[in-house]
């Protein structure tokens, strides 16, 4: 169980995060995107990207229920964060869907069918502890941030200022989410440095984007989107994992040490269990 100190620290961090969001980051997809500046000539490939990211964002009900479940007994701040996070994430779906309809790339009916199709699958949390999900949150939000910045650039290149603004607003929220999760990981490091470091290594080794396998035709979409939608191992390392370690003040050598010490301890525990079972008299 987290200490009182941990809970109090996170409480302060959440109030700061919330205050900053209210003061500087609140936006409205209906009003704050220059919809009149949609470029009707924007290629279908960018619409396909928008539709795919809408698919990933579309599992919001599962993210919220999964998140609340995992963080239920962690701390008040972490529960409140999920609620606030859900509201902010909702706008990402709204903005992408509004773009697809207002640009004429998709009809309302197509969007309704797509949303219904999405809900035939279910997202399950990839990890079961609050600490691992928090670490996953840092990586996942950073990955989404990197992807959205690339999309913003692509939209600008074809002169679609509306689509560029959708990605810019979404990306600004994603990086704020990544930073909050990072503060929480910092607090976990203060609580229990070695086990948090082991979790960082574990989550990084098992990382995949949340849409994999549940957004319809995900692999086919990614193949068409190529660089635009993919977070390959190299990109993950260079743009997400290593910068996160730097910001957290964790050296790669420290990770190696923790992992090898844990493996050694596991081997020793196994050996002594074997010896105990051999020492027991046969019935
Ligand atoms: Fe999002
Ligand atoms: Fe986010």
Image (cartoon, rainbow, N blue to C red):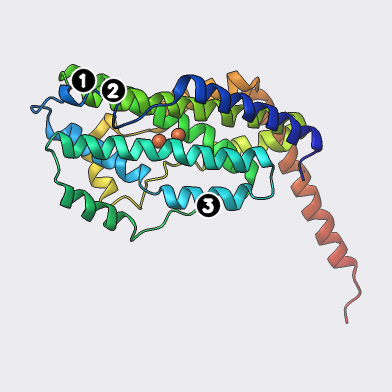
The CA span between labels 2 and 3 is 30 Å
Q: How far apart, in angstroms, are the residues tagged by discs 1 and 2?
A: 6 Å
The residue at which mark 2 appears reads as 165
Local crowd at mark 2 within 10 Å, few (<14), some, or many (≥20)? many
In the picture of the structure, the residue carrying the numbered disc 1 is 161
SS of the residue under disc 2:
helix
Q: Nearer the viewer, mark 3 or mark 1?
A: 1
Left or right, 48 with reference to 43: right
SS for dot 3: helix
Residue 75 at x, y = what percent? 69, 42
- Count how many numbered circles sit on residues in the image: 3
Q: Is residue 180 left or right of residue 91?
A: right
Q: Are marks 1 and 2 in contact (CB under 8 Å)?
A: yes
Which residue is identified by label 3?
66
Label 3 near ligand 2 (CB < 8 Å): no
Q: Does residue 179 show up?
A: yes
């Amino acid at each position: 169980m987290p200490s009182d100190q941990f809970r109090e620290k996170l409480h302060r961090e959440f109030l700061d995060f919330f205050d900053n969001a209210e003061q500087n980051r609140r936006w409205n997809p209906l009003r704050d995107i220059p919809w009149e500046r949609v470029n009707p000539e924007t290629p279908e490939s960018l619409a396909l990207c928008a539709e795919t990211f809408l698919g990933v964002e579309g599992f919001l009900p599962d993210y919220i229920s999964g998140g609340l479940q995992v963080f239920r007994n962690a701390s008040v701040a972490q529960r409140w964060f999920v609620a606030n996070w859900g509201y902010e994430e909702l706008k990402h779906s709204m903005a992408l869907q509004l773009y697809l309809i207002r640009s004429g790339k998709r009809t309302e009916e197509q969007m309704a069918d797509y949303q219904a199709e999405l809900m035939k699958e279910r997202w399950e949390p990839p990890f079961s502890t609050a600490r691992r999900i928090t670490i996953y949150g840092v990586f996942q939000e950073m990955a989404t941030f990197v992807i959205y910045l690339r999309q913003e650039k692509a939209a600008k290149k074809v002169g679609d200022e509306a689509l560029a603004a959708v990605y810019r607003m979404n990306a600004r929220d994603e990086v704020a989410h990544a930073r909050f999760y990072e503060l929480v990981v910092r607090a976990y490091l203060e609580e229990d440095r070695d086990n948090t470091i082991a979790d960082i290594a574990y989550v990084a080794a098992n990382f995949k984007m949340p849409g994999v396998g549940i957004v319809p035709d995900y692999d086919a979409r990614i193949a068409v989107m190529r660089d635009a939608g993919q977070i390959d191992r190299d990109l993950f390392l260079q743009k997400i994992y290593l910068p996160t370690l730097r910001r957290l003040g964790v050296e790669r050598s420290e990770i190696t040490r923790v992992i090898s010490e844990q493996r050694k301890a596991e081997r020793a525990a196994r050996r002594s269990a074997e010896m105990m079972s051999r020492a027991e008299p046969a019935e």
